[in-house]
Amino acid sequence: MSGLALINLVPIPPLDGGRIAVSLLPMRQSIAWSRLEPYGFFILIGLLYFGALDYLFRHVAQPILKFLLFFAGA
């Protein structure tokens, strides 16, 4: 379940991470990034198809989850 929360923070416009990225970017880049939102679903499907999110989960999210589980006592 925590893995889904980490994947949701990937900065792609349909995910929550995309909204965070838009709020943190300067105005010009924020407008350009928010224009990707209608295509975000297709970008997400493409990343899933080509295995980019698998790479992200394996090399970024997995160590974070192990770290959190260590301190949670699980």
Image (cartoon, rainbow, N blue to C red):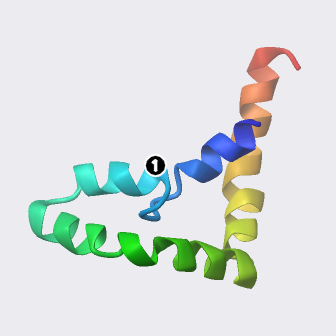
Q: Residue furthest right?
A: 74
Q: Quadrant of the C terminus?
A: top right
> Tag 1's secondary structure?
helix
Q: Quadrant of the N terminus?
A: top right
Vertical position of residue 58 compared to residue 66: above or below? below
Residue 22 in percent (x, y) is at 27, 57
Residue 16 located left or right of residue 19:
right
Q: As shown in the figure, which amino acid type bears the numbered disc 1?
A: Asp
| Residue in the foreground of this view, choosing between 40 and 3 | 40
* Residue at the spot 11% in from the left edge and 70% down from the top edge: 28
Residue 50 in percent (x, y) is at 72, 84
* Residue at the spot 79% in from the left edge and 36% down from the top edge: 66
Residue 59 in percent (x, y) is at 72, 60
Q: Residue furthest top?
A: 73
| Residue picked out by circle 1 | 16
In terms of image quadrants, where is residue 53? bottom right
Vertical position of residue 72 compared to residue 2: above or below? above
Q: Residue furthest front?
A: 38
Vertical position of residue 22 compared to residue 68: above or below? below
Residue 49 located left or right of residue 74:
left
Residue 60 located left or right of residue 69:
left
* Residue at the spot 54% in from the left edge and 72% down from the top edge: 41
Q: Residues within 10 Å of mark 1 (few under 14, many from 20)?
A: some
Residue 52 in percent (x, y) is at 67, 75
* Residue at the spot 57% in from the left edge and 50% down from the top edge: 8
| Residue in the foreground of this view, choosing between 56 and 9 | 9
| Residue in the foreground of this view, choosing between 36 and 50 | 36
Vertical position of residue 54 compared to residue 20: above or below? below
In terms of image quadrants, where is residue 27? bottom left
Q: How many marks?
A: 1
